[in-house]
Amino acid sequence: MLYEMVAIARYAGVKGVDDAREVCRLVGKMVVNNRGVVRNIQNWGLRPLPKIVNKDRQSHIVGAHFYMKFDSSPAVQREVLRSLRSDPRIVRSMIVKNGGDT
């Protein structure tokens, strides 16, 4: 299945951009190690959030956004989403199925 993922990493100075890069690398390795294919990765940079987002007792107004398109099984997609939601560096994440088997 083809999936598109958008995630927002917390911003804590220069380290926030490194957090986004490291999480993106971790997700890519997770997909590839489980016989998936990463098709596209884009760094959308720092952007203000539309509203204040609270996670782990912290308020966030800016985040490092990134996008990834990948092919994987539904089980791998669930594992990726579970790991993103449990990662304290990620403020928000979303994965959308983009189509059937390709």
Image (tube, grey):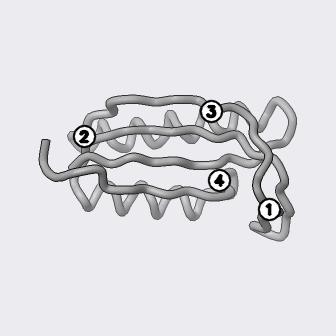
Residue shown at 32% from the left, 30% from the top:
39
Return the residue at label 3: 44
Residue 30, disc: none
Amino acid type of disc 4? Ile
Labels 1 and 4 touching (C-beta < 8 A)? no
* Disc 1 to disc 4, C-alpha distance: 16 Å
In the displayed structure image, the side of residue 28 where residue 19 appears, left or right:
right
Amino acid type of disc 2? Gly
Q: In this rendering, is residue 101 above or below 35? A: below
Say whether disc 2 or disc 1 marks the residue closer to the N-terminus.
2
Residue shown at 68% from the left, 46% from the top:
9
Residue 90, disc: 4
Labels 4 and 3 touching (C-beta < 8 A)? no
Residue shown at 45% from the left, 59% from the top:
81
In the displayed structure image, the side of residue 71 where residue 95 appears, left or right:
right
Badge nearest the viewer, 3 or 2? 3
Residue 36, disc: 2
Q: Secondary structure at mark 1?
A: strand
Query: Along the line of sight, which residue is nearer the eye, 85 or 60?
Result: 60
Amino acid type of disc 3? Trp
Return the residue at label 1: 51
* Other-residue count near label 2 (Cα within 10 Å), few / some / many at <14 / 14–19 / ≥20: some
- Residue 97 placed where, x, y %? 31, 55
